[in-house]
Amino acid sequence: MAGNRGGKAKLLLVEDNELNRDMLSRRLKNSGYEIIIAVDGKEGLEKTTVEKPDLILMDMSLPEIDGWEATRQLKANPETKNIPVIALTAHAMLGDREKALEAGCDEYDTKPIKLPRLLNKIESCVANSRF
Ligand code: MN
């Protein structure tokens, strides 16, 4: 997964909401990342296998396969289990973070996205995964 060592990371954004997806992918591109898009959990799993991203930003509420189940499947697969997953959720509900971490997510952030905060989490997860 350290294919972009020294360069900006390749991120897979799994998000079903078109507005959120367009806005976040544009802001991350402007921050220098290569962005791959998936519109549901099933496509997220497929693109992970094909594209081998350095990190996955996973909306939790998704059609086809939700973010919790998609993350469980990624973490159960030796090919993909070391790719960091940051859970994104609209509900900042008590226990939500724990539920995401239980599914195997490495980090957690809430919408609306605060870009500097998310960028810090991305950088720290990518750095950790390169050891
Ligand atoms: Mn959603």
Image (cartoon, rainbow, N blue to C red):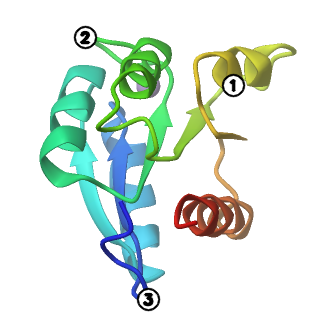
The three-letter amino acid code for the residue at tag 2 is Glu
> Which of 20 and 88 lies nearest the eye of the viewer?
88
Measure the alpha-carbon separation of dots 2 and 3: 35 Å
Circle 2 or circle 3, nearest the eye: 3
Residue under numbered circle 2: 64
Q: How dense is the environment of label 2, judged by Cα within 10 Å: few (below 14), some, or many (20 and up)? A: few
Marks 3 and 1: CB-CB under 8 Å? no
120 is higher (above) or lower (below) than 103: below
> Which of 79 and 11 lies nearest the eye of the viewer?
79
Q: Relative to 49, is 75 on the left or the right?
A: right
**Which label was assigned to residue 101?**
1
The residue shown at (39%, 87%) is 7
Residue under numbered circle 3: 6
Say which label, 2 or 1, has the lower sequence index.
Answer: 2
The residue shown at (31%, 55%) is 53
Helix, strand or loop for disc 2: loop
Say which label, 3 or 1, has the lower sequence index.
Answer: 3
58 is higher (above) or lower (below) than 68: below
Marks 2 and 3: CB-CB under 8 Å? no
Circle 2 or circle 1, nearest the eye: 1
Residue 119 lies, in percent from the top left, at 63, 67
Say which label, 2 or 3, has the lower sequence index.
Answer: 3
The three-letter amino acid code for the residue at tag 1 is Leu
The three-letter amino acid code for the residue at tag 3 is Gly
117 is higher (above) or lower (below) than 8: above
Helix, strand or loop for disc 3: loop
Quadrant of ligand 1: it is top left
Residue 85 lies, in percent from the top left, at 52, 41
